[in-house]
Image (tube, helix red, strand yellow):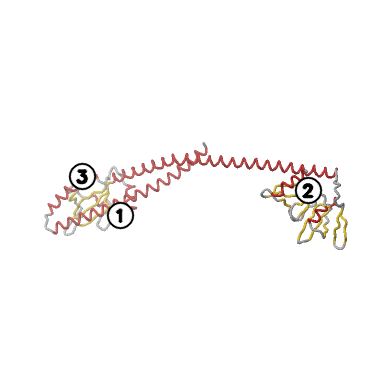
């Protein structure tokens, strides 16, 4: 429920911001279209009247014909009227306004030199009192060879109705989208969350199993160490090996060997006391002389004694890391291919 409310709140904030932005841009586009239509219509009518006067058609006849054409057009989004240079209305959709003073002087466009942009008209539209002012002049174009001016008006009531329709459409659209997106997002989040929780549970279970296995393995090491001490092998293996420490030859008892390793083609024997000596034999040769129930070839570099193993920990991808006493100068790792053999060695 909390997830649903959070997503719904975020979507509401985004939708309100987006709706406001899209509505503003759409109203700007609507105003620009009506401004352009008014410009074109006023120019066309002015040119038509100019040609009529030039061809000798009486002024009164043109006025009567134009008045007939303009009747009731004030119900349209854009309509025209004609005034003279003194500001008196010559033609208008509302016939009762004929002869009256034009309200164009109170408009932002009060001369033929003025031309509103969509931004300017939008500001006028927002500030207009629609109960007192039903239309706004947006363009004027003079008629040649006369004192007439063709005036383009935008019907503010129609424009407001268009804005309301756009607002309602945007709100409806965002509501419908919200009804689809919010439940879909919540369901997707829950589905992914459930999958993630399941993965975590599996990882937790796998980790617990690995910890249990390592615990058993370390317990097996302790048991094996005790068994080797109590029942030493009598399989004819050497009791001691010959090593060298500087210029001194040492006869090192087998039970005092902690681990053996090779580095830079030199074989080193590390005693339980931490002292390190060298041997002329390779790891293979030494392993063949040692009791395999006590010593194990961990990898290509190390042979370890069961007595020196301190702890076994998981390392990387299915590898085991052997901690020994005394501590080795590098990590002793048993690869996943040899891990099973190592476990069998401990359980033998």
> Would residue 61 be visible to someone looking at this image?
yes
Residue 186 lies, in percent from the top left, at 50, 40
Q: CA distance from mark 2 to mark 3?
A: 105 Å
Residue 309 numbered mark, or none: 2
**In the rendered structure, which disc, 2 or 3, sits on the residue that comes first in sequence?**
3
Residue for badge 1: 116
Q: CA distance from mark 1 to mark 3?
A: 25 Å
Q: Residues within 10 Å of mark 2 (few under 14, many from 20)?
A: many
Residue 172 lies, in percent from the top left, at 38, 41
Q: Is residue 138 left or right of residue 304?
A: left
Could you say which is closer to the camera, residue 151 or residue 192? 192
Q: Residue furthest top?
A: 1
Q: Residues within 10 Å of mark 1 (few under 14, many from 20)?
A: some
Q: Is residue 195 left or right of residue 32?
A: right
Position of 171 relative to 51 (above/below): above
Could you say which is closer to the camera, residue 330 or residue 116? 330
Residue 317 lies, in percent from the top left, at 66, 49
Could you say which is closer to the camera, residue 343 or residue 16? 343
Label 1: element kind: loop
**In the rendered structure, which disc, 1 or 3, sits on the residue that comes first in sequence?**
3
> Would residue 278 be visible to someone looking at this image?
no
Q: Residue furthest bottom?
A: 247
Please state the total of marks drawn on the protein image.
3
1 or 3: mark nearer the eye: 3
Label 3: element kind: loop
Look at the image and tell me in which quarter the C terminus lies.
top right
At horizontal 25% and vertical 46% (from top left) the residue drawn is 76
Residue 338 numbered mark, or none: none
Residue 140 lies, in percent from the top left, at 24, 55
Residue for badge 3: 72
**In the rendered structure, which disc, 1 or 2, sits on the residue that comes first in sequence?**
1
Q: Residues within 10 Å of mark 3 (few under 14, many from 20)?
A: some
């Amino acid at each position: 429920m909390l997830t649903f409310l959070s997503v719904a709140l975020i979507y509401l904030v985004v939708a309100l911001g987006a709706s406001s932005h899209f509505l503003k841009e759409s109203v700007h586009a609507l105003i620009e279209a009506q401004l352009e239509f008014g410009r074109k219509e006023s120019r066309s009518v002015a040119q038509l009247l100019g040609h009529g006067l030039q061809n000798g058609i009486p002024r009164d006849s043109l006025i009567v014909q134009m008045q007939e054409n303009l009747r009731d057009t004030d119900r349209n989004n854009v309509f025209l009227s004609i005034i003279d240079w003194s500001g008196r209305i010559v033609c208008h959709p509302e016939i009762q306004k004929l002869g009256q003073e034009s309200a164009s002087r109170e408009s932002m466009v009060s001369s033929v030199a003025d031309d509103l942009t969509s931004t300017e008209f939008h500001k006028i539209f927002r500030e207009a009192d629609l109960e007192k002012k039903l239309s706004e002049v947006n363009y004027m174009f003079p008629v040649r060879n006369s004192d007439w001016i063709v005036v383009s008006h935008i019907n503010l009531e129609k424009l407001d109705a268009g804005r309301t329709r756009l607002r309602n459409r945007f709100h409806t659209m965002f509501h419908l989208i919200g009804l689809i997106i919010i439940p879909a997002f919540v369901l997707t989040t829950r589905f992914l969350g459930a999958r993630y929780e399941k993965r975590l549970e599996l990882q937790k279970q796998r980790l617990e199993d690995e910890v249990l296995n390592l615990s058993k393995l370390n317990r097996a090491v302790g048991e094996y160490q005790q068994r080797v001490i109590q029942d030493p092998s009598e399989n004819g293996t050497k009791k001691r090996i010959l090593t060298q420490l500087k210029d001194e030859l040492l006869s090192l008892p087998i039970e005092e060997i902690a681990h053996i390793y090779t580095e830079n083609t030199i074989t080193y024997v590390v005693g339980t006391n931490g002292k390190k000596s060298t041997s002329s034999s390779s790891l293979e040769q030494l392993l063949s002389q040692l009791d395999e129930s006590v010593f194990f070839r961990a990898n290509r570099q190390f042979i370890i004694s069961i007595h020196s193993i301190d702890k076994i920990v998981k390392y990387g991808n299915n590898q085991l890391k052997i901690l020994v006493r005394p501590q080795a100068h590098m990590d002793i790792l048993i690869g996943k291919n040899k891990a099973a053999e190592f476990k069998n060695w401990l359980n033998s």
